[in-house]
């Protein structure tokens, strides 16, 4: 009988080629709570309220937006049902790269790794100039401080992220956990005060009205809501650095989905109440960020609004640190597999961290920030555009991973897996994710803020990158078979 780890039509990538060097393992001691806080930092509440929720209301299905977070959670929950079953057998911390390789083969897996690395790098590179601009405005306007060029803040943040990434993952977890708790408290205070004061014009249940649910574009509403769930791949990326991964990873994954569904869904409703049901859609469509921050000032006062502004910057920093850590581990994993120089895949003797990969990622991010500065790009527009490309690439990755889950779990039915977890739930997830991919492609101009023609060419570029990665894997099979055999190894 074929092993459950066998990719189709080629040798099993789960079997290590013992002729190749054993890869080094990272070390860590994260529990479920620490891991949950790590991945929540990627889409922290204040950045989510200002960046994601406002757009879901303004450009999605308006007053029906709160329900979209519940619907997106159901879709990703069905994906997680199969994904977590697969996690029992895929012991590598390579994220979607390892899972796609195990299910669909080395060539498809390496193509996915190329797309994943690009996605995380683009989002990280986009966040760096953005926090520079945001920090400049915070210091000058909110705090009344001196005028300093945004490059100083951008480079300083990249340097700080790199330093934290150099050390043990537990250090990053403690920093992110502290920042996230502060954000949760502020958002909770905002929600409570809005409800206690009855919103702008009285509390309503307008999100339950069928006319509102299907108003605007329900497809775009679901698409933007699903963006808030990006990043939960990190639960398996950090597999080597958590204790009792068989228990910790599922708890953090389902905890993340539940948290985003409840907190983002409720906060979406609170924002609508704060703006007034009759004004919410128009206000968030005209000025998504300003509309939400304005309600913080209205309901929490000037001090509350200033705190939210400061925490918005720490939220961007937290997202950068999470992105840096994920990308670093992708580079570390690919280096350990021989795709990149194996010298990069060295763990720090004391911290057990991928310190060399972290330094490479920091240098690349610094270079990207410098290029954006000398190019004279509009930072706020650039951030939205390249982050949108990264988000599109992640949608593609998770859609392909859902196919890999189905293939992998059904290759061998003798593992005590229920029909629900190995077939029905993954198929439902694939249908939903494929629908999102189609919506994202058809509305790529809105997602990236570019023309439809340019947006479609960018989509083509993402697919071509996947093909180039697959082609490189096949080239390795011919010219460097010892490296090819270690792609996605377990």
Image (cartoon, rainbow, N blue to C red):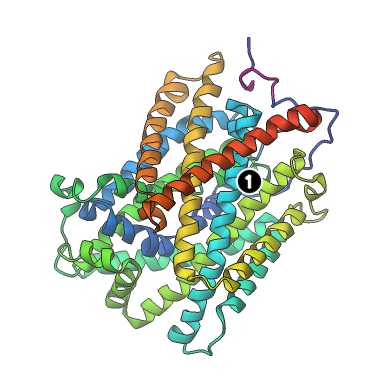
Q: Residue at x 14, y 65 (%)?
A: 202
Identify the element where label 1 is drawn: loop
Which residue is tagged 1?
238
Q: Quadrant of the C terminus?
A: top right
Magenta stretch mostly in which secondary structure? loop
Q: Can you say whether 197 is above or below 408 in the image?
A: below
Q: Position of residue 343 (x, y in %)?
A: 82, 48
Q: Residues within 10 Å of mark 1 (few under 14, many from 20)?
A: many
**Closer to the camera, 47 or 461?**
461
Asked if residue 410 can be seen in this view, the reply is yes
**Closer to the camera, 386 or 456?**
456
Q: Which contiguous range is marked in magenta? A: 5-12
Q: Residue at x 69, y 48 (%)?
A: 331
Q: Residue at x 61, y 71 (%)?
A: 157
Q: Quadrant of the N terminus?
A: top right
Q: Viewed as shown, does residue 385 lie left or right of 248? A: left
Q: Position of residue 22 (x, y in %)?
A: 82, 36
Q: Viewed as shown, does residue 224 lie left or right of 389? A: left
**Residue 10 lies in the magenta stretch:** yes
Q: To which quarter of the image does residue 359 belong?
A: bottom right
**Residue 9 lies in the magenta stretch:** yes
Q: How many numbered dots are placed on residues in this image? A: 1
């Amino acid at each position: 009988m074929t092993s459950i780890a066998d990719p189709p039509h080629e040798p099993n990538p789960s079997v290590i080629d013992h002729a190749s060097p054993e890869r080094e393992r990272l070390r860590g001691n994260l529990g479920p709570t620490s891991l949950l806080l790590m991945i929540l930092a990627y889409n922290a509440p204040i950045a989510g309220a200002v960046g994601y929720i406002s757009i879901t209301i303004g450009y999605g299905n308006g007053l029906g937006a709160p329900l979209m977070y519940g619907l997106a959670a159901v879709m990703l929950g069905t994906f997680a049902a199969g994904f977590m079953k697969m996690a029992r057998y895929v012991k590598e911390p390579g994220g979607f790269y390892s899972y796609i390789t195990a299910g669909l083969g080395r060539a498809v897996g390496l193509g996915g790794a190329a797309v994943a690395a690009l996605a995380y790098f683009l989002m990280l590179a986009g966040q760096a100039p953005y926090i520079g601009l945001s920090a400049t405005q915070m210091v000058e306007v909110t705090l009344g401080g001196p005028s300093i060029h945004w490059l100083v803040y951008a480079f300083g943040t990249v340097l700080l992220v790199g330093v934290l990434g150099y050390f043990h993952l537990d250090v990053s977890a403690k920093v992110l956990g502290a920042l996230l708790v502060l954000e949760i408290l502020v958002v909770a205070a905002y929600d409570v005060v809005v409800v206690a004061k009855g919103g702008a014009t009285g509390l309503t249940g307008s999100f339950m009205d069928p006319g509102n649910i299907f108003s605007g574009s329900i497809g775009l509403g679901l698409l933007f809501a699903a963006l808030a769930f990006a990043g939960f791949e990190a639960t398996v990326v950090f597999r080597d650095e958590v204790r009792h991964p068989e228990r910790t990873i599922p708890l953090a994954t389902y905890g993340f989905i539940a948290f985003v569904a409840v907190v983002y869904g409720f906060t979406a409703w609170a924002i609508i109440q704060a703006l007034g049901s009759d004004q919410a859609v128009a206000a968030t469509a005209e000025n998504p960020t300003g509309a939400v921050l304005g309600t913080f000032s209205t309901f929490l006062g000037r001090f509350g609004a200033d705190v939210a502004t400061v925490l918005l910057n720490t939220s961007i920093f937290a997202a950068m640190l999470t992105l840096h850590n994920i990308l670093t581990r992708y580079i570390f994993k690919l280096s350990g597999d021989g795709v990149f120089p194996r010298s990069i895949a060295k763990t720090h003797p004391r911290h057990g961290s991928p310190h060399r990969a972290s330094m490479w990622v920091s240098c690349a991010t610094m270079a990207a920030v410098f290029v954006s500065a000398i190019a004279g790009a509009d930072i706020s527009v650039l951030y939205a555009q390249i982050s949108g490309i990264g988000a599109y690439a992640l949608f593609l990755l998770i859609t392909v991973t859902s196919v890999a889950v189905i293939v992998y779990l059904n290759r061998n039915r003798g593992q005590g897996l229920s029909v629900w977890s190995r077939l029905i739930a993954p198929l439902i997830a694939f249908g939903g994710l494929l629908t999102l991919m189609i919506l994202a492609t058809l509305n790529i101009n809105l997602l990236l803020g570019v023309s439809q023609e340019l947006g479609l060419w960018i989509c083509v570029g993402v697919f071509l990158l996947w093909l180039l990665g697959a082609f490189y894997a096949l080239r390795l099979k011919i010219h460097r078979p010892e490296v090819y055999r270690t792609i996605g190894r377990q």
